[in-house]
Image (cartoon, rainbow, N blue to C red):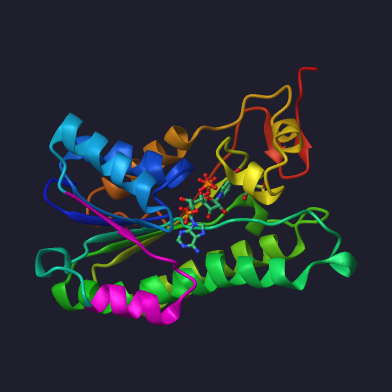
Amino acid sequence: MELQGQTVLVTGASSGIGRDCARGLAPLGVRLLLVARRQERLAVLAAELHARYQTACLAQTLDVRDRQAVQHWFEHLPPEWQCIDIVINNAGLSRGLDRFQEGNINDWEEMIDTNLKGLLYITRAVLPGMVARGRGHVVNIASIAGLAAYPGGNVYCATKAAVRILGDALKQDLLGTPVRVTTINPGLVETEFSPVRFRGDTERARQVYRGLTPLTGQDVAETVVFCLTRPPHVNIQELTLLPTDQANALLVHRRE
Ligand code: NDP
Ligand code: 8X3
């Protein structure tokens, strides 16, 4: 399927998988609506993509946790950006690896508010237009953390399991419309995910990928592009991609 001229919303486009999705989609002639909290990074990305591919980009600050801000943002989009064809719900984070019984409830709320409620707010805003226009694709970045839990993953894993079941639910509610829904479950991807999880403890973050070859944001972006470019009658419902050095969230092969 041709993506030329389609308007793609990428949440969490200031880093990692979201930024690489924008970079992977720009050469295909899409228009990019990029949101995250760090406006300066979005502006740099938009300038890069415009310089390289003449991509039309709109980079806007948005905290997906803020329900009213999401509603206000959506209602005040410039008219030429209001018809969103594709949304990549990517904004997300983990905080800590505490055992549940020692868990920090503020961290729990931050993960639930971002990974689940933020995704709900964004999707609720854009989906009616997709249904009305008879075209659209919702791509949710979940995780292998939503396939099975791991020690200390508790609430992060629960948010990702919720995103997976929500994809199933959306597909059912959208049945009879041409709107497609795809859930992507990456394994270990080297991004700012671990430094964010460990609040800037870069040494601890580095250990996550020690001795193995993780996925890159580009690997995930290429998978997203593959799903988006299938013919309209093909809906890739769910796709899991792991590094070759990883079997599941608990089992990795380290060469040292
Ligand atoms: P990064 O930390 O590199 O990127 C996370 C992105 O989410 C940033 O652009 C950040 O932007 C954005 N974000 C976080 N909170 C908010 C918010 N409240 N409002 C708007 N944007 C927000 O991590 P990844 O690229 O790895 O993560 C992207 C997604 O992939 C997440 O959903 C993550 O759970 C998932 N994932 C990651 C894996 C990995 O191993 N890295 C594996 C499986 C899934 P800003 O801070 O500027 O707002
Ligand atoms: C990120 C991958 O295994 O660290 O969702 O939870 S994992």
Provide residue 42's location: percent of width, then percent of height: 34, 48
The image shows residue 104 at horizontal and vertical percentages of 79, 67
The quarter of the rendered structure image containing the C terminus is top right
Q: Does the magenta portion include 68?
A: yes
In this view of the protein, which residue sits in the foreground, 23 or 165?
23
Residue at 89% x, 69% y: name it. 101
Q: What residue is shown at x 38% (from left), y 65% (from top)? A: 62
Determine the residue located farthest toward the top in the rendered image: 256
Residue 124 seen from this side: no
Please report the bounds of the magenta region as a residue range. 57-75
Q: Quadrant of residue 190?
A: top right
Q: Relative to the observer, which residue lies in front, 214 or 230?
A: 214
Q: Position of residue 182 (x, y in %)?
A: 41, 58
Q: Is residue 107 left or right of residue 220?
A: right
The answer to whether 229 appears left or right of 201 in the picture is left
11 sits left or right of 200 in the view: left
The image shows residue 48 at horizontal and vertical percentages of 25, 34
Q: Quadrant of residue 173?
A: bottom left
Furthest residue to the right?
Answer: 101
**Does 12 appear above or below 80?**
above
Compare residues 48 and 23 and report the one nearer the observer: 48
Is residue 122 covered in magenta? no
Residue 238 position (above or below residue 124): above
Choose top left, top right, bottom left or bottom right for residue 172.
bottom left
**Residue 247 visible in the displayed image:** yes
Decide if residue 87 is on the left or right side of residue 50.
Answer: right
